[in-house]
Amino acid sequence: MTEPLSVHVGLDGGRDYDILIGRGLIAGAGARVAALGARAAGIVTDETVGALYAAGLRESLEATGLRAGIVTVPPGEASKSYTRFAEVCDGLLALKIERGDVVIALGGGVVGDLAGFAAASLRRGVRFVQVPTSLLAQVDSSVGGKTGINSPHGKNLIGAFHQPRLVLADTATLDTLSEREMRAGYAEVAKYGLIGDEGFFSWCEANWRGIFSGGPERDEAVAICCRAKAGVVTRDEREDGERALLNLGHTFGHALERITGYDSGRLVHGEGVAIGLALAFRFSARLGLCGGQEAGRVANHLALAGLPTRLQQVPGGSGDAGAILDAMAQDKKVRDGALTFILARGIGQSFIAPGVDRAELRAFLEAELAAA
Ligand SMILES: NC(=O)c1ccc[n+]([C@@H]2O[C@H](COP(=O)([O-])OP(=O)(O)OC[C@H]3O[C@@H](n4cnc5c(N)ncnc54)[C@H](O)[C@@H]3O)[C@@H](O)[C@H]2O)c1
Ligand SMILES: O=C(O)C(=O)C[C@@H](O)[C@H](O)[C@H](O)COP(=O)(O)O
Ligand SMILES: [Zn+2]
């Protein structure tokens, strides 16, 4: 195995950690987890990922003398629920995971957010390791410490900041990921270029096929995204400012996830984000902030990669403008009842826009829904 790529998240107070990126990292995970000083590990996974990778991870942990147990949830967004959260916490307690032990999230962002929140809550906080297995989780959700579950009121409304001690992104696991989930994760990859790195967006336009097929571009893209996210998180861990930029496309996307009832059969997070990214750029163009051509370039690239870019592409419908506005009202960026959006002056020139006018937004959504 070649040396993994490494990205450091330089948080203070002894909370800094490494993200290791490379093929085959699960086989050597045991030694790296044991080096954290734990004696036991509670692996949280979903049925799909567990069937593929949990035995290998467990074997690697046990080979170093660690005691390891597995807690499994059904795959899909619906598992970020109060019910599954309680099951995971009780499952970890049944495994007698102590404060000095470690909870390992083995899976996509759903498992990462759920297991991370359980780790933050169990005995008021046990150590946490991320072993992300989806593209989305490797480039985004495994880094930065946002954990949580959904509420019928909105997405990720119950949660905690709880940083991992280590992230092991085994990029070989992406070989078994479905095309649909690969595309969904790619929306978050493209997001980094759209936020603040036009050069990276251009690189994605030229190289996205290599990310999908597992060429050297895959590890490179994961490392670039993790480096970008690590920088933001180090400067603004709790989203008092700059971190909100990582929410580009998410005010729209989260509203659509709530409207579709967190039903992964209809819409997964990355698909909601793809529609949200295209909408954020078209809304920016409508407000005269960026050119219509740039908004077109964004939507064209996402569509080329097989992602949805329009409200009309939400299976079963997105609801009308009123329903979308209602779903946005609980967004965590709302201040004094006013919506904050991430808008763009161009590709790679996103900015935080507080106090977005509701009437303007409603008119935009109505125009989008009326468009052929
Ligand atoms: N905490 C954060 O900073 C953050 C960032 C972005 C997204 N998120 C959250 O992440 C979630 C989405 O994550 P996701 O897209 O990974 O979804 P997911 O966890 O549901 O995984 C997608 C699907 O792929 C399957 N899968 C995962 N890895 C696989 C593999 N290697 N081989 C075969 N199948 C595999 C899973 O079983 C699941 O069915 C959302 O809940 C979103 O809110 C959180
Ligand atoms: O890490 C962040 O910060 C992000 O916003 C990354 C997003 O891709 C991710 O979907 C996150 O979970 C959204 O956070 P939320 O605070 O809007 O729930
Ligand atoms: Zn996201």
Image: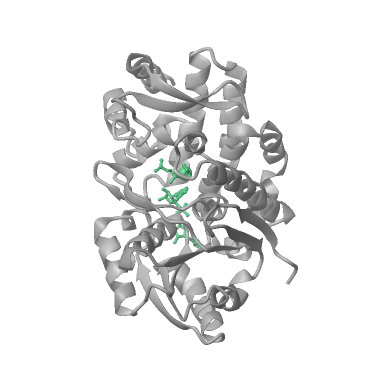
Residue 162 position within the rendered picture, expressed as x and y whole percent measured from the top left: 42, 56
Give the colouring mode of the picture.
one colour
Q: How many marks?
A: 0
Pick the front one: 110 or 307: 110
- Image quadrant where one finds the N terminus: bottom right
- How far across and how far down the image is residue 58, in percent? 49, 80
Relative horizontal placement of residue 192, taking residue 77 as reference (left or right): right
Residue at horizontal 57 percent and vertical 36 percent from the top? 302
Residue nearest the viewer, comparing 190 with 315:
190
Q: Nearer the viewer, residue 176 or 240?
A: 240
Q: Residue 285 location, x and y as percent?
A: 53, 17
Foreground residue among 321 and 138:
138
Q: Quadrant of the C terminus?
A: top left
The spot of residue 334 in percent (x, y) is: 34, 30
Q: Which of the 4 image quarters holds residue 306?
A: top right
Q: Is residue 309 above or below residue 83?
A: above
The relative height of residue 40 versus residue 285 in the rendered view (above or below) is: below
Residue in view at x 24 percent, y 45 percent: 152
